[in-house]
Amino acid sequence: MNNSAARQRPLPPFGNQIDSESDLILCYCGPRAWRLASPSAERVASLVFPIGRDPSEYRWPVSGRSVLVLTLGQPRTSVDFLVIELLRAGADTVYLDTGSGDLLAYKNPGAVCAP
């Protein structure tokens, strides 16, 4: 996909709430995601990966940042595709909390720093 096509994709839910100061972004997946990610002054910048969607449908604002993905019961295969898409979007590191007590980390060797 070329850059102009990527720019035409919409931001994920709450993507317009992400500012340039956020070093860590939370990404909620699963049935409770919308409630947990809803913006407020006390919360870390958060995104929602909607159930049943393809992560490549969105323009993820994560370049040069760390992302913590909270699966909340989302099927692992769809979450794996989300991790790949976040790394393609330039995330520095994607941490995956599957709810099993383990935290997986995927470092992007080609990530660039955010401006």
Image (spheres, grey):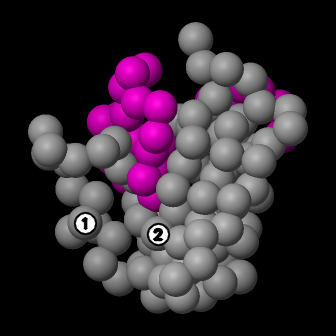
Q: Which stretch did the figure color magenta?
A: 1-27
Tell me if 81 is positioned left or right of 50 in this view.
right
Label 2 Cα crowd, 10 Å radius (few <14 / some 14-19 / many 20+): many
Question: Is there any visible trace of residue 47 in the rendered image?
Answer: yes
Can you name the residue that lies furthest to the front here? 101
Tell me if 14 is positioned left or right of 27 in this view.
left
Q: Give the x, y percent position of residue 66.
A: 57, 42
Question: Is 101 inside the magenta-drawn segment?
Answer: no
- In terms of secondary structure, where does tag 1 sit? helix
Q: Give the x, y percent position of residue 109.
A: 86, 38
Is residue 81 shown above or below 88? below
**Residue contact at pointers 2 and 1, CB within 8 angstroms:** yes
Q: Label 2 amino acid?
A: Leu
Q: Label 1 amino acid?
A: Leu
Q: Say which residue appears at 77% left-offset and 48% top-offset.
A: 107
Q: Say which residue appears at 39% left-offset and 21% top-offset.
A: 21
Q: Give the x, y percent position of residue 103.
A: 59, 70
Is residue 32 shown above or below 56? below
Q: Which residue is mark 1?
A: 36
Sequence-wise, the earlier of marks 2 and 1 is: 1
- Numbered mark located on residue 70 in the image: 2
- Report which quarter residue 80 is drawn in: bottom right
Image quarter where the N terminus lies is top right
Tell me if 45 is positioned left or right of 55 in this view.
left
Can you name the residue that lies furthest to the top here? 115
Q: Say which residue appears at 69% left-offset and 59% top-offset.
A: 105
Label 1 Cα crowd, 10 Å radius (few <14 / some 14-19 / many 20+): some
- Report which quarter residue 57 is drawn in: bottom right
- Numbered mark located on residue 98 in the image: none
- In terms of secondary structure, where does tag 2 sit? strand
Q: Say which residue appears at 63% left-offset and 31% top-offset.
A: 63
